[in-house]
Image (cartoon, rainbow, N blue to C red):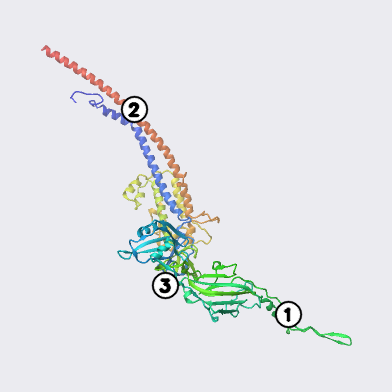
């Protein structure tokens, strides 16, 4: 721009911009004051929110100390043989120890095929693979073996699994396994799957493993009499009333007369648990003359003739009746024996002497022939050693025949050619009782405890259930840490002393700087002072849940403002911060865990709702601050209103300032234009005068 040319509002020849800016700076004072007020409101709101977060964290740790899931109820379960059995203990499990033997874990069927070509084609068909009652059923259109295995696994879910194992570069072996353990989850094949399994040599026709169970008279031992209603003079059960009869074909029949009974020891190969053995036999009953009639006749005593008489001189003289009682004895009234009808005949006794009646599903009665078939799977009666037969009837005879044994697996019509493992139930011995379960995860033996079986135990395993003192200790340390952070925040907000922040060694330099901005922010807020006092009172009070309570205060756990025991003045003690004497805390947790739990929260009126204790009281206090509609919510809501009003005022002031600045700039631009015009006229007159003077010379 050429010198001497001035455009109002563009150039600042007369410093009007500075003048306007100076005037506007004065006008902006109310705006800056309002902006400072808004910033203060926002910092206060942030401070309340920080306090809310710290109090909420403290409340969470406090709730954890008295809720249903409090750490004082946690249990630690350990096993002396972790490789064989591990244990999970529920919160309601009893403390203590018990012993258990794992005779064998539950297993599943795992069948391997012969070596087959890796390029084998699986024929089209309907394939059914079963594990117990669950099945995988799908139609295969034909194709490669690898594709067939993929299709089978895609549909099998958690029932079975198939895998190809490389035998050589050109040969494979197919492994099919049930994913369900237990004897009832045997692996079986139907339709095309059955022929396919035979084709690849996975299964073969079951061999006849049955054999007759022949007895000799000397094998039949007397058994204990077990009448529901004992009767004096009723004959005991006796093996003398049992006889063996063999026909020309070698078939053996055991005839059991009324009040006959016997027991015999099972062969070791049946009772040692190595085979899945079954005992089968048939029996029928025949009504015979009741033996109580004959027995009662004998029990009435001797029958004496009537007393005779003589006639003398037409006088009849009668003899006294005979007396059969010995001197000093009185006659007892004759009580006749009652007939006995009892349909319970067969029992198994285990190696611990415990008898078990055969289950109803072991019997299959034929109404037409009157013959009942009995099938006893010995795995259902762990460690059974003795078969017992009792005919307690007085008018019924039993005929037992066809006693034989065989392997349970043969009832499928096939058996595995290469069985890596066969389905069997888990067997454990607890409190002298042997029991079976189809799974290795057993939760119905010991209340609130789950047993996980892995292998058989070499020796009896000891299971210990102990309190989880480490979890309780961690929860208490967390509580103390959160409590101290709340106390620190309350101190910072209510006291304007820089040393409060410098005492907090755990803060970083940036955190200390941030906290410094909040120092003494709510110095006159009595709600914070009262809240701090209430929390300090809650942790210092005594809580006696029973008259004989030993632990009633936090200080007895080694948690107090002077837990370290140092003498003299301590700033942290004056600020209300808690300290922990770890040795004292460890000892208290080890010896008085139950009382510590009750001190933090207990039910005073028996309604199963916690209504007293340190944690309960602190939760109640903190709830009044952090819950919806609580103190902090009210504070932040009030600040929201103030912030909204402040923002509105700032917007209004900014609008006013823009208008004011525009007016000033317009006014001074006009003034500057006038000055420029006058200056221009002055220059013109000067130039004109100068030109006239030059002409006169």
Residues under numbered marks 2 and 3 in contact, where contact means CB atoms less than 8 Å apart: no
Please name whichever residue, 62 or 155, is drawn nearer the observer in this view of the structure: 155
From mark 2 to mark 3, how far is it between C-alphas? 96 Å
Residue 476 at what x, y percent from top left? 42, 57
User: Looking at the image, which residue sits at the far bottom?
Assistant: 312
From mark 3 to mark 1, how far is it between C-alphas? 65 Å
The crowd level at tag 1 (other Cα within 10 Å; few <14, some 14-19, many 20+) is few
Please name whichever residue, 375 or 514, is drawn nearer the observer in this view of the structure: 375
Which of pointers 1 and 2 indicates the residue nearer the eye?
1
Mark 2 or mark 3, which has the lower sequence index? 3
Check disc 2 and report its element: helix, strand or loop.
helix
Check disc 1 and report its element: helix, strand or loop.
loop
Residue receiving disc 1: 331
The crowd level at tag 3 (other Cα within 10 Å; few <14, some 14-19, many 20+) is few
Residue receiving disc 3: 458
Name the residue located 39 percent from the left edge and 64 percent from the top edge. Answer: 199
From mark 1 to mark 2, how far is it between C-alphas? 135 Å
Mark 1 or mark 2, which has the lower sequence index? 1
Check disc 3 and report its element: helix, strand or loop.
loop
Please name whichever residue, 512 or 673, is drawn nearer the observer in this view of the structure: 673
Residue 580 at what x, y percent from top left? 40, 58
User: Looking at the image, which residue sits at the far top?
Assistant: 696
């Amino acid at each position: 721009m050429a010198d001497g040319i001035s455009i109002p509002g563009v150039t600042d020849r007369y410093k009007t911009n500075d003048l306007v800016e100076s005037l506007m700076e004065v006008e902006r004072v109310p705006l800056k004051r309002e902006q400072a007020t808004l910033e203060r409101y926002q910092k206060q709101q942030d401070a309340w929110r920080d306090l809310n977060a710290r109090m909420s964290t403290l409340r969470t740790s406090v709730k954890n100390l008295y809720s249903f899931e409090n750490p004082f109820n946690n249990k630690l379960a350990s096993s002396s043989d972790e490789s064989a059995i591990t244990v999970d203990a529920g919160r309601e499990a009893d403390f203590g120890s018990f012993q258990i033997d794992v005779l064998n874990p539950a297993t599943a069927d795992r069948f391997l095929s012969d070596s087959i070509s890796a390029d084998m084609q699986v024929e089209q068909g309907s394939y059914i693979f079963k594990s117990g009652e669950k099945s995988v059923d799908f139609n295969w259109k034909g194709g490669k073996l690898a594709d067939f295995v993929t299709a089978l696994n895609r549909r099998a879910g958690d029932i079975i699994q198939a895998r190809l194992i490389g035998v050589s570069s050109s040969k494979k072996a197919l492994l099919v396994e049930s994913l369900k353990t237990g004897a009832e989850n045997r692996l079986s094949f139907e339709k095309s799957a059955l022929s396919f399994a035979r084709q690849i040599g996975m299964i073969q026709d079951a061999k006849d493993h049955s054999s007759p169970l022949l007895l000799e008279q000397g094998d039949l031992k007397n058994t204990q009499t077990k009448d529901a209603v004992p009767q004096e003079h009723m004959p005991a059960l006796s093996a003398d009333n049992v006889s063996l009869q063999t026909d020309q074909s070698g078939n053996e029949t055991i005839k059991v007369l009324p009040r006959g009974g016997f027991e015999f020891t099972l062969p070791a190969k049946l009772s040692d648990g190595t085979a899945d053995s079954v005992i089968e036999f048939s029996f029928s009953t025949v009504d015979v003359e009741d033996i109580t009639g004959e027995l009662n006749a004998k029990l009435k005593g001797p029958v004496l003739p009537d007393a005779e008489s003589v006639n003398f001189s037409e006088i009849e003289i009668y003899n006294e009746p005979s007396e059969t009682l010995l001197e000093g004895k009185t006659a007892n009234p004759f009580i006749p024996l009652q007939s006995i009808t009892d349909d319970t005949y067969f029992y198994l006794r285990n190696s611990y002497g415990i008898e078990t009646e055969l289950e109803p599903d072991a019997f299959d009665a034929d109404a037409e022939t009157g013959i009942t078939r009995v099938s006893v799977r010995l795995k259902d009666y762990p460690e059974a050693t003795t078969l017992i037969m009792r005919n307690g009837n007085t008018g019924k005879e039993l005929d037992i025949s066809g006693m034989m044994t065989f392997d349970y697996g043969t009832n499928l019509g096939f058996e595995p050619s290469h069985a890596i493992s066969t389905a069997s139930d888990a067997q454990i011995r607890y409190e002298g009782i042997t029991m079976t379960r189809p799974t290795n995860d057993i939760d119905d033996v010991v209340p609130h405890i789950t047993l996980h079986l892995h292998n058989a135990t070499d020796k009896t395993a000891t299971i210990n259930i102990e309190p989880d003192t480490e979890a309780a200790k961690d929860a208490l340390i967390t509580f103390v840490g959160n409590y101290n952070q709340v106390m620190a925040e309350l101190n910072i907000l209510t006291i304007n002393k820089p040393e409060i922040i410098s005492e907090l060694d755990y803060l970083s330099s940036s955190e200390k700087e941030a906290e410094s901005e909040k120092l003494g922010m709510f110095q006159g807020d009595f709600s914070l002072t009262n809240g701090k006092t209430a929390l300090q009172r809650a942790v210092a009070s005594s809580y006696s849940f029973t008259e004989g309570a030993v632990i009633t205060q936090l200080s007895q756990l080694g948690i107090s403002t002077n837990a370290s025991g140092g003498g003299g003045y301590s700033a942290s003690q004056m600020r209300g911060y808690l300290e922990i004497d770890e040795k004292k805390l460890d000892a208290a947790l080890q010896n008085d865990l139950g009382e510590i739990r009750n001190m933090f929260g207990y039910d005073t009126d028996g309604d199963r709702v916690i209504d007293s204790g340190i944690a309960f009281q602190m939760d109640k206090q903190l709830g009044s601050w952090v819950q919806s509609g609580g103190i902090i919510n009210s504070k932040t809501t009030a600040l929201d209103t103030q912030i909204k009003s402040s923002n509105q005022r700032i917007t209004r002031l900014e609008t006013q300032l823009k208008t004011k600045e525009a007016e000033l700039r317009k006014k001074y631009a006009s003034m500057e234009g006038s000055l420029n015009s006058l200056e221009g006229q002055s220059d013109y007159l000067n130039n004109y005068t100068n030109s006239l003077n030059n002409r006169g010379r």
